[in-house]
Image: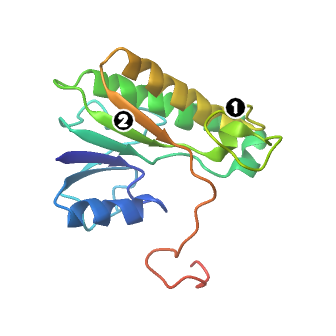
Amino acid sequence: MRVLVTGATGFLGRAVVPALARTGHEVVALIRDPAATVRDAHSTVLGGLGDGTGLVSLPDVDGVCHLAAVARARDSPADPLRYWRVNAGGTLALLEALNRQPRPPVIVLASTCAVYGTPERQLITEDVPTCPANPYGASKLAADHMAAGLAATGAIGAISLRALNLAGSAAGKPIGTPPG
């Protein structure tokens, strides 16, 4: 299976790319930095979601792990347009590119619990109403809705994984090692 991974050089992407490669998938990594290397990727496509570059020359894929995002929720009120441009606008550009594929791919979106804002109860299930408290959560919720809307047409398959806070080591270092 050929799988596009957006955000391949990011925190989550650095774990997902090798896991996909180990299980026999052909990984296509979408990267912004031309100097970046993604060791386990079969190929790379240079471009960013915020400006749509790289999506024009996107190869046919069977699936997508959409991990790219501007993710510092606490910083989003100071620069909301950046979050909307990358998280919502970038997802829209990706969905438009996927809609041009000859066969419907499946997309897995890395969403966030920030779409729920501050819920009234601590156990968050899928029936808890969404009410983002910041531009980050709102931009990720918009991305979820866009993917679900396109999936409802049959053009793609889509699922959003609304993860809580992710933790782990940086760049393969032992947990607890300071970054840098």
Determine the image quadrant of residue 162. Answer: top right
Question: Looking at this rendering, what residue extends furthest in the top direction?
Answer: 153
Three-letter amino acid code at the position of disc 2: Thr
Q: Residues within 10 Å of mark 2 (few under 14, many from 20)?
A: some
Q: Secondary structure at mark 2?
A: loop
Q: Secondary structure at mark 1?
A: loop
Three-letter amino acid code at the position of disc 1: Thr
Label drawn at residue 53:
2
Instruction: Write the residue at 48% across / 82% down.
Output: 173
Q: Residues within 10 Å of mark 1 (few under 14, many from 20)?
A: some
Determine the image quadrant of residue 180. Answer: bottom right
On the question of residue 22 being in view, the answer is yes
**Residue named by callout 1:** 130
Image position of 48 (left or right of 103): right
- Give the answer, above or below, for where 126 lies relative to 75: above
Q: Nearer the viewer, residue 10 or 122?
A: 122
Rendered location of residue 28, percent (x, y):
24, 50
Image position of 91 (left or right of 177): left
Q: Indicate which disc, 1 or 2, sits on the residue closer to the N terminus.
A: 2
